[in-house]
Image: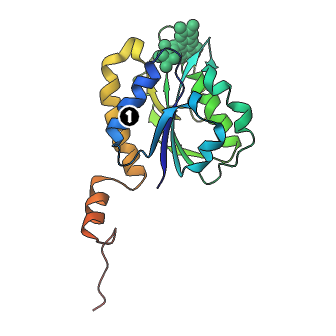
Amino acid sequence: MRLGLFFGSSTGATAWAAQLLRAELGEDLVTSFGDIRDLSAAELADFDVLVLGAPTWFVGELQEDWQARLIELERLDLSHTRVALFGLGDARGYPGTFLDGLGELRAALTARGARCDLGHWPAEGYEFDASRALLGSGNGKTFCGLALDVENEGWLTAPRARSWCRQLRRELGLGRRARRVRRLGLPASPVRLRR
Ligand SMILES: Cc1cc2nc3c(=O)[nH]c(=O)nc-3n(C[C@H](O)[C@H](O)[C@H](O)COP(=O)(O)O)c2cc1C
């Protein structure tokens, strides 16, 4: 499985979070890693799984390097790609547009056929007024990806990252049990003997 972890970052926070996530996921799993600034959007189509990170800027806008890739993105077919998203925002400073950029990135990816079905994250415990990164309408209680707020809840970043990566591994069928089973060369579930 080819898994690429890419991010946009204007002041370094998302780049730092991306490194944390790479360490948590394990370098064996993350086959490519980098800043979206150094990549053409077309290269995104080379992966089976994409883990993509974006902060929100200028009151509800997607970070500028991602913005610059949106037109290229429109030409891609991502129907064979599964996507997990993570976003950085400031819920206290921008409660009405918390993580909006992540919602915008998700919309652009799903319009290209990508399945953004990995790493959905409960919104419970976050304090904000509105977010376009919420799934479902109105009172949605799930973010479309991992929500990080280093400004106000920096101490939660590492535990959230750890727990999200564990969830991602599980969703990809790479949980601890699956890994052990593969190492032993066993089938993923018991083979029943007919007596
Ligand atoms: C001018 C400005 C506008 C921002 N607008 C938003 C916003 O609308 N929504 C939000 O959730 N965060 C907003 N933020 C917070 C950033 O997303 C946050 O600081 C993030 O960690 C920056 O990530 P980066 O360092 O990777 O660029 C804003 C920050 C600044 C300085």
Name, please, the residue furthest toward the top: 93
The amino acid type found where label 1 is placed reads: Leu
Answer yes or no: is residue 173 visible: yes
Quarter residue 107 falls in: top right
Q: How many marks?
A: 1
Answer yes or no: is residue 137 visible: no
Judging depth in this view, the residue of 103 and 46 nearest the camera is 46
**Residue 175: % across, % down:** 32, 53
The quadrant of the rendering that contains the C terminus is bottom left
Would you say 72 lies left or right of 173 here? right
Quarter residue 104 falls in: top right
Judging depth in this view, the residue of 100 and 1 nearest the camera is 1
Task: Say if 84 sits above or below 62 in the image.
Answer: below
* Mark 1 CB within 8 Å of ligand 1: no
Would you say 182 lies left or right of 98 here? left
Q: Residue at x 33, y 43 (%)?
A: 26
Would you say 143 lies left or right of 71 here? left
For the residue carrying disc 1, how many other residues have a C-alpha within 10 Å: few (<14), some (14-19), or many (20+)?
many
Judging depth in this view, the residue of 143 and 34 nearest the camera is 34
Task: Say if 59 sits above or below 133 in the image.
Answer: above
**What secondary structure is marked by label 1?**
helix
Q: Residue at x 58, y 15 (%)?
A: 57
Q: Residue at x 26, y 64 (%)?
A: 183
| Residue with the mark numbered 1 | 21
**Residue 90: % across, % down:** 48, 14
> What is the image's colouring?
rainbow
Judging depth in this view, the residue of 101 and 25 nearest the camera is 25
**Residue 134: % across, % down:** 56, 30
**Residue 151: % across, % down:** 41, 12
Name, please, the residue furthest toward the front: 38
